[in-house]
Image: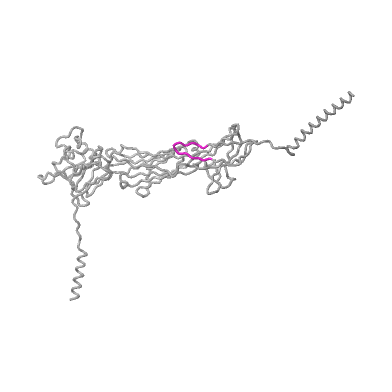
């Protein structure tokens, strides 16, 4: 008996675990407009009914639908009456002429009182009498969500005048307004730079909605100004995954690049982040420009009916480099040649001397004085240290012009500006001539010579006087 009860309990447990759990079937769908434009009105019209089992779709339209004439006149769709003629139901199928964007355009024309095949007013039944299955809804700051919709193929519109999407509720659909612009932002890791420094750039964008497009132009370009040398090192990630451009998708020319992608068919998810990184080196031409400006451009499709109809976004990033210009003069404001300077900066209490490599056009810094680059004033009393970033620097005079005293303290020069109003720093350096020092023996000897001369002259006068007095006697 105990064995029988144990077996019965075991069988019940197996049956309990193996009993299928049947979920409540889904009978309605939803449409979400994720990026509505605030204040605009959206609506969804049901064009076709839908029956599906998760992988197979059967679309139908009723003969008395306000959309029937529009659909029947569109060359890309075939309508076949069901066997039950009393049902007035037509099975919908597409042919080689079907294009979602063109079909949406035909629906939009009809909704505005125009025929699908021309611009004349449509004949009855007019689509202008069609009642939205969802909406109209005025967009606020959040997504628009329509629920409780019968399964079908829906035409979503906005008051901006363009089609948002054609979508199937199976059971849930997400659409994106075609009027949305694409994010496009360019940044660099520095603004104030030195000659020879590598500047790293990053562009951030996103994958747009591709609904209704047979092709989608996504073209990013950037070309450096003359003071920057592009390093031909573009790296692209889309959705966090490195993308390797196919042949012809990226070209390096004109000191920059052009990335030209057709996004359709590549499997990119909507709103996936697009990150493009690259770099440029500040070159010797930077000294001829206060600001080094370069502008990145994104050109993208903005019309599913004609993908060559594009919009453009731009963003620029400016970097700049500075010079320290020395003007050497005396107290009479006369320019002085042949004053010899070195430049240094202090880093954690250590002197770093300016070193300019003319062969490779690179500024570097060394703790060894022997490596320092010297700037010697010309006949106009001018000399320069070029290609500097913002900071505090010190001019040290190591040789003064002939006849002038060497400076006893370094001259502090602060380079500070911004990329919109940059000016080079000017160091106005005064040198004074010294008094002539006494000769060997000192000034006292000279006085003795003078007094001795006067005494000799007095003696001569005295002798002459005495001689004259003797003659008279």
**Left or right of 107, for residue 382:** right
Residue farthest along the front direction in this orientation = 473
Q: In this view, does 289 lie to the left or right of 213?
A: right
The extreme top residue here reads 472
| Quadrant into which the N terminus falls | bottom left
**334 vs 414: above or below:** above
Res. 171 visible in picture: yes
Magenta-tinted stretch: 413-425
Q: In this view, does 145 lie above or below 460?
A: below
Of all residues, the one furthest to the bottom in this rendering is 1
Placement of 160 over or under 462, stated as above or below:
below
Residue 97, given in percent of the width and then of the height, sits at 23, 40
Which quarter of the figure has residue 353?
top right
Q: Quadrant of the C terminus?
A: top right
Instruction: Provide the major secondary structure of the magenta segment.
Output: loop
Q: Is residue 47 visible?
A: no
Q: Looking at the rendering, which quadrant does residue 95 occupy?
A: top left
Comparing 56 with 47, the one in front is: 47
Residue 415 forms part of the magenta stretch: yes
Looking at the rendering, which quadrant does residue 77 occupy? top left
Rendering colour mode? one colour
Q: Where is residue 240 in the image (x, y as percent from the top left)?
A: 36, 50
């Amino acid at each position: 008996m105990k064995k029988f009860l144990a077996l019965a309990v075991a069988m019940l447990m197996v049956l309990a675990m193996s009993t299928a759990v049947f979920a409540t079937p889904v009978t309605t769908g939803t449409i979400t407009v994720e990026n509505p434009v605030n204040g605009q009105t959206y609506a969804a019209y049901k064009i076709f009914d839908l029956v599906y089992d998760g992988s197979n779709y059967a679309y139908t339209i009723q003969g008395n639908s306000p959309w029937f004439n529009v659909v029947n006149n569109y060359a890309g769709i075939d309508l076949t009456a069901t066997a039950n003629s009393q049902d007035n139901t037509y099975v919908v199928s597409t042919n080689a002429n079907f294009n979602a964007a063109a079909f949406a355009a035909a629906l939009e024309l009809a909704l505005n009182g125009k025929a699908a095949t021309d611009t004349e007013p449509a004949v009855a039944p007019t689509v202008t009498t069609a009642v939205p299955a969802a909406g109209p809804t005025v967009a606020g700051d959040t997504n628009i969500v329509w629920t409780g919709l019968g399964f079908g193929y829906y035409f979503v519109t906005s008051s901006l005048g363009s089609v948002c999407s054609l979508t199937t509720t199976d059971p849930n659909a997400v659409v994106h307004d075609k009027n949305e612009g694409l994010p496009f932002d360019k940044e660099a890791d520095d603004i104030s730079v030195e000659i020879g420094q590598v500047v790293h750039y990053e562009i951030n964008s996103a994958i747009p909605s591709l609904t209704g497009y047979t092709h989608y132009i996504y073209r990013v370009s950037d070309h450096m100004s003359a003071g920057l040398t592009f390093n031909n090192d573009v790296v692209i990630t889309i959705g966090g995954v490195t993308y390797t451009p196919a042949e012809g998708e990226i070209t390096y020319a004109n000191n920059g690049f052009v990335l030209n992608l057709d996004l359709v068919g590549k499997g990119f998810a909507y709103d996936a982040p697009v990150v493009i990184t690259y770099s440029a080196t500040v070159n010797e031409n930077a000294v001829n420009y206060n600001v080094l400006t370069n502008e990145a451009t994104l050109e993208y499709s903005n019309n599913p009916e004609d993908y060559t109809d594009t919009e453009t976004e731009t963003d620029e990033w400016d970097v700049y480099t500075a010079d320290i210009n020395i003007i050497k003069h005396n107290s009479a404001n006369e320019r002085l040649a042949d004053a010899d300077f070195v430049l240094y900066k202090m880093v954690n209490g250590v002197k770093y001397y300016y070193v300019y490599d003319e062969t490779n056009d690179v500024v570097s810094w060394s703790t060894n004085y022997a490596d320092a680059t010297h700037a010697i004033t010309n006949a106009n009393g001018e000399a320069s240290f070029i290609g500097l970033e913002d900071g505090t620097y010190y001019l040290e005079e190591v040789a003064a012009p002939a006849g002038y005293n060497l400076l006893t303290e370094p001259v502090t020069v602060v380079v500070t500006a911004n990329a919109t109003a940059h000016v080079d720093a000017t160091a106005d350096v005064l040198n004074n001539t010294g008094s002539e020092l006494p000769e060997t023996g000192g000034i006292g000897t000279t006085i003795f010579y003078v007094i001795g001369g006067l005494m000799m002259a007095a003696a001569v006068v005295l002798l002459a006087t005495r001689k004259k007095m003797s003659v008279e006697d």
